[in-house]
Image (cartoon, rainbow, N blue to C red):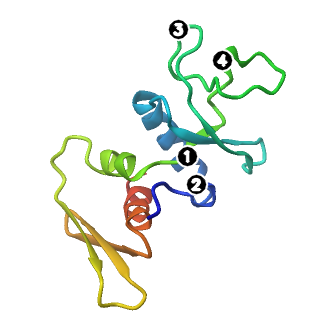
Amino acid sequence: MKMRISPEQLQELSPEQQEKLREWWKDHKEEGDYFVLINENGEIATLSERVNGSCNGYWNCECAIDDGEDPACRSEENSLPLLSIGQLIQLLDPKEETIFTMMRYIAAKPQIYKVSVDGKEYFGDTMCDCLWQAVKEIL
């Protein structure tokens, strides 16, 4: 089962959508989250790192990176989270008022997943991909 979005899926976002995602993540970042760093050309510079606690009293620092520079507080301006299924749901349902259903069409070959968010349907090869389609629309 696919548990989180891929770095390539993050590149589907416009710069404005990426910024909205960064803003959301600032308030929801947790230890153990996976993220990628984006270089100045908008390309993925680091494939996957994990947030490992706080540094200098700031929780939102990417301290897991030791590239010879001061790892105390690497800029988070260039990082984007590899959202888990739980984070995708949290982003879609911030007040726990969204009506959504998830299902898998087992009879279909290959299996197809569907997520319905407030009546709008999203389809994909995995549940994670369905949720990602919905999240991209609200970003």
Task: Classify 10 Å Cα crowding around label 1: few (below 14), some (14-19), many (20 and above).
Answer: many
Task: Classify 10 Å Cα crowding around label 2: few (below 14), some (14-19), many (20 and above).
Answer: many
- Among the 4 quarters of the image, the one containing residue 76: top right
Label pair 3/2, CB-CB below 8 angstroms: no
Q: Residue at x 46, y 35 (%)?
A: 25
Label pair 4/3, CB-CB below 8 angstroms: no
Which amino acid type is shown beneath numbered disc 3? Answer: Gly
Q: Position of residue 15 (x, y in %)?
A: 60, 48
Tell me the number on the disc at residue 10.
2
Q: In the rendered image, which quarter contains the N terminus? A: bottom left
Q: From mark 3 to mark 2, how far is it between C-alphas? A: 28 Å
- Among the 4 quarters of the image, the one containing residue 99: bottom left
Tell me the number on the disc at residue 18.
1
Q: From mark 4 to mark 3, how far is it between C-alphas? A: 10 Å
Q: Residue at x 67, y 25 (%)?
A: 75
Q: From mark 1 to mark 3, how far is it between C-alphas? A: 26 Å
Find numbered disc 1 in the image and state the secondary structure of the residue it sits on: helix
Q: Earlier in the sequence, mark 4 or mark 2?
A: 2
Q: Earlier in the sequence, mark 1 or mark 3?
A: 1
Q: From mark 4 to mark 2, how far is it between C-alphas? A: 23 Å
Which residue in the structure is indicated by mark 3? 57
- Where is 14 relative to 64, above or below? below
Q: Nearer the viewer, mark 1 or mark 2?
A: 2
Which amino acid type is shown beneath numbered disc 4? Answer: Cys
